[in-house]
Image: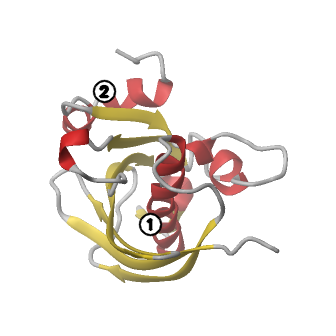
Amino acid sequence: MKSENPDAKHFLSIPWAAAHIDAPGTVRETASSRFPKQDTEDELFSTTLHTDKTIAAFLTLYKRPSAASGENMIREVKALLTLRHGVNGYPNVSHGGIVATILDEVIGLVFPVNKINGLIPDGAYMTAYLNTQYVRPVQTPQTILVVATVKKVEGRKYWIEGVIEDKDGQALAKAESLYVKVKEKL
């Protein structure tokens, strides 16, 4: 068991979150964006939102496709995040911009997860649009589950949906997005 990971240890102490982590075949990792880079990439999630007062813990979950499935990419990525009052825009409610940012971030994790598993080409993938629907207030403090699901791929275009759920599986916010692989310079 990889309980030495502080984020995994945190979420394993929450029974409903532990059920997602312990699901058979689940790979768990601290989100790649939680690690500072020398070129300032990922500063928002590695520094600004990586505090005990903002997003206290962030863990990525996914299952590698089996050879028998015939699937050529990881189409679903889940993330557990513990939100604190530092993300509030209203008393005990996360700011809507943070909600959209979390959806964009977790949807975008589809790409590094697939790249490190050799399932999609290297390169930059960027948000072309993110249409966000706010269903219910995202209360703080609380732990949320975010699920990103690849719906369609055509060439360089990836249509991905995301949903933020509470511990009871109630949808709090949803997003439809289009990501595009950036063309390489000639």
For label 1, the SS is helix
- Give the distance between the C-alpha atoms of the residues marked 2 and 1, in whole angstroms: 23 Å
Q: What is the x, y in percent for residue 132?
A: 40, 81
> Badge 2 is on which residue?
12
Instruction: Check disc 2 and give the amino acid type.
Output: Leu
Query: Which image quadrant is residue 162 in?
Result: bottom left
Residue 34 vs residue 151, the one in the foreground: 151
* Residue behind mark 1: 103
At a point 24% along the width and 32% down the height, the residue shown is: 25
- Image position of 179 with respect to 80: above or below: below
The reply, left or right, for residue 154 in relation to residue 55 is left
Task: Please state, as top left, top right, bottom left or bottom right, where the C terminus lies in the image.
Answer: bottom right
Within 10 Å of the Cα at label 1, are there few (<14), some (14-19), or many (20+) other Cα atoms?
A: many
Label 2 with label 1: CB-CB less than 8 Å: no
Residue at the image point whose x is 48% and y is 62% from the top:
102
x 69%, y 52%: residue: 48
